[in-house]
Image (cartoon, grey):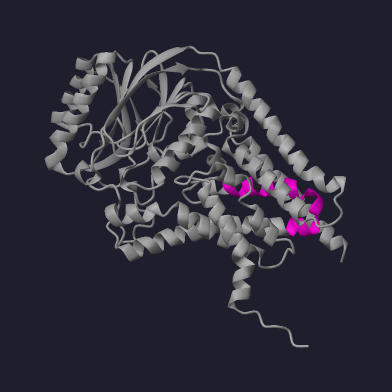
């Protein structure tokens, strides 16, 4: 009897379930933002790994490729319009980054399939640990790009995300994978409908109920307040192509000035402008003093993003992407220099090997990285200010709270993403930084999305995308330290240890059976 050859359709059917998982992961995030989909998105992929075959990595890779291409497609917009690359190169680079990120889901699939085959009893515990371990590695490897980690899909599920003050966003990711693994095991177990078969999903949903209960407790017992801060957040909505054009310099400055004077009528304690709101170096002799006068005339602290430059001697200069705090007396009260720079946005990695690539931030040279987590003291509040890309790194932001910040801010410019999912994805990550550290978060963008986020992660107000708006409000100031603030990613590192022990056990078990 001749075996039927495997044709193209047969191979496609083998990857259909992984493709479905990729689609479900994608719709769990903005713009679709169907958050419930995340709780079963990995089930099709896990079902396809039942036999623990050698193709497990490729199935996971396909899931990741579908997910990331449909999630970070906005990179094409940024590179094509603002990076000076043609559309073909932009698409290739986006696809290459998607493929790199997909490797992590491929590794998850391969390791999960191996554990499932060798030690099936621990699979539903191993799967979340492996997933989180890989998310942590992605957070640090090379420059780090922890975009759209699974836990972020639950940004609006306040009861669930409260656990982030212990585990960080990684705990939410682990909980979602736990449920997915339990559901996959229940479906794939075609044996007798025994108590053992039902126990796994029951245990997983019991864990969800426990976390939900913790969330209810945290929401009904907010942290002690040291006071409240009245704020005004300015979204100037400056066109990206105009931002560094000298002929628009005066108009941009006057736009922010007029909006600040209008906001000052509500008598805020602080007015916040976005990243690089000033289209000039802070040391510019003419605009420097005009900027100081704006704070003095408005009678409030002014926090603004601005490029800065310092002379190193021998006609050498170092440029920074900075945040300045100006007092109501018209004096510079503090400065923070961005520490985690954006590759291809603020500097070109491997510049000699990539001479054809230009930075997306035009009008200025390569930035240098800051070296300290400087807090900005606005009398009523000590503010930790993350600049743009930095807000996606939980370990970085927690350093501000650990150092004494009782309020967090992040200033950004999301104009170069266009009307895509990126501004929404970026905003949702700031929600977790608020919960992890139990700090109010003031997120201010040149355009979309500016918002006021409470320590619980509740978004009390936000602007639209590509609108010129001012948000005013009052936020609590908190000084107590959460478990996450004190100990950081200890949960994620524990997942690495658990994964290693389970894998070692599986390998030793295999050898003992030889």
Residue 265 x/y as whole percent: 25, 14
Q: Position of residue 396 (x, y in %)?
A: 48, 35
Which residue: 19% across, 43% down? 242
Question: Quarter-wise, where is residue 10 in the image?
Answer: bottom right
Between 59 and 326, the one nearer to me in the picture: 59
**Residue 216 position within the rendered picture, expressed as x and y whole percent measured from the top left:** 63, 24
Q: Nearer the viewer, residue 190 or 474?
A: 190
With 84 as the anchor, is 76 left or right in this view?
right
Q: Residue furthest bottom?
A: 1
Q: Nearer the viewer, residue 46 or 287?
A: 46
Asked if 325 appears above or below 468 in the picture, the reply is above
In the rendered image, the vertical position of residue 36 relative to residue 26, given as above or below: above
Q: Main secondary structure of the magenta part?
A: helix
Residue occupying the far front of the picture: 193
Membership of 335 in magenta stretch: no
Residue 203 visible in the snapshot: yes
Name the residue: 47% across, 46% down. Answer: 32
> On the rendered image, what quadrant is the N terminus found in?
bottom right
Q: How many marks?
A: 0
Give the residue at the far top of this rendering: 227
Inspect this view and state whether residue 330 appears.
Answer: no
Horizontal and vertical percent position of residue 505: 80, 53
Query: Which quadrant holds the C terminus?
Result: bottom right
Direction from residue 137 to residue 449 in the image, left or right: left
Q: Is residue 130 magenta?
A: yes
Point 46% across, 52% down: residue: 71
- Left or right of residue 439: residue 420: left
Residue at the spot 61% in from the left edge and 38% down from the top edge: 172
Q: Nearer the viewer, residue 476 or 1?
A: 1
* Span colored in magenta: 114-135
């Amino acid at each position: 009897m001749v075996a039927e050859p495997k044709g193209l359709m047969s191979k496609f059917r083998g990857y259909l379930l992984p493709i479905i998982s990729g689609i479900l992961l994608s719709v769990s995030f903005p713009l679709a933002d169907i958050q419930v989909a995340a709780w079963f998105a990995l089930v099709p992929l896990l079902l396809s790994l039942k036999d623990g075959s050698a193709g497990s990595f490729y199935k996971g890779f396909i899931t990741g490729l579908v997910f990331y291409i449909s999630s970070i497609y906005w990179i094409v917009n940024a590179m094509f319009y603002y990076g000076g690359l043609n559309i073909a190169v932009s698409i290739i680079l986006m696809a290459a980054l998607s493929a790199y990120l997909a490797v992590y889901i491929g590794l998850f699939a391969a390791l999960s399939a191996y554990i499932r085959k060798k030690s099936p009893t621990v699979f539903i515990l191993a799967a979340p640990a492996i997933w989180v371990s890989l998310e942590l590695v992605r957070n640090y490897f090379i420059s780090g790009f922890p975009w759209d980690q699974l836990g972020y899909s639950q940004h609006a599920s306040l009861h669930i995300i409260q656990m982030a003050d212990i585990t960080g966003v990684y705990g939410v990711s682990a909980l979602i994978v736990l449920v997915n693994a339990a559901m996959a095991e229940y479906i794939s177990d075609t044996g007798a409908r025994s108590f053992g078969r039902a126990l796994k999903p029951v245990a997983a949903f019991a864990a969800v109920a426990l976390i939900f209960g913790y969330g209810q407790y945290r929401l009904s017992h907010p942290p002690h307040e040291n006071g409240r801060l009245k704020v005004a957040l300015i979204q100037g909505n400056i066109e990206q192509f105009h931002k560094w054009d000298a002929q628009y310099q005066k108009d941009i400055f006057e736009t922010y000035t007029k909006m600040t004077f209008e906001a000052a009528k509500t008598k805020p304690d602080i007015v916040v402008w976005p990243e690089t709101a000033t289209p000039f170096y802070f040391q510019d002799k003419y605009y420097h003093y005009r900027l100081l006068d704006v704070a003095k005339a408005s009678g409030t602290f002014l926090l603004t993003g601005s490029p800065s430059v310092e002379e190193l001697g021998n006609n050498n200069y170092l440029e920074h992407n900075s945040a300045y705090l100006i007092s109501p007396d018209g004096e510079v009260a503090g400065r923070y220099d961005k520490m985690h720079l954006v590759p291809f946005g603020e500097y070109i990695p491997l510049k000699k090997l990539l001479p054809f690539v230009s930075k997306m931030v035009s009008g200025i040279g390569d930035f240098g990285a800051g070296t300290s987590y400087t807090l900005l003291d606005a009398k009523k509040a000590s503010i930790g200010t993350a600049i743009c890309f930095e807000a996606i790194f939980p370990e970085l932001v927690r350093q501000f709270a650990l150092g004494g910040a009782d309020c967090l801010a992040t200033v950004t410019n999301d104009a170069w993403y266009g009307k895509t999912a990126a501004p929404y994805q970026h905003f949702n990550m700031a929600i977790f930084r608020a919960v992890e550290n139990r700090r109010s978060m003031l997120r201010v963008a040149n355009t979309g999305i500016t918002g006021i986020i409470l320590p619980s992660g509740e978004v009390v107000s936000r602007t639209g995308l590509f609108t010129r708006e001012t948000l005013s409000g009052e936020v609590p100031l908190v000084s107590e330290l959460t478990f996450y603030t004190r100990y950081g990613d200890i949960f994620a590192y524990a997942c690495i240890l658990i994964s290693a022990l389970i894998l070692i056990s599986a390998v030793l078990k295999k050898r003992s059976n030889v």
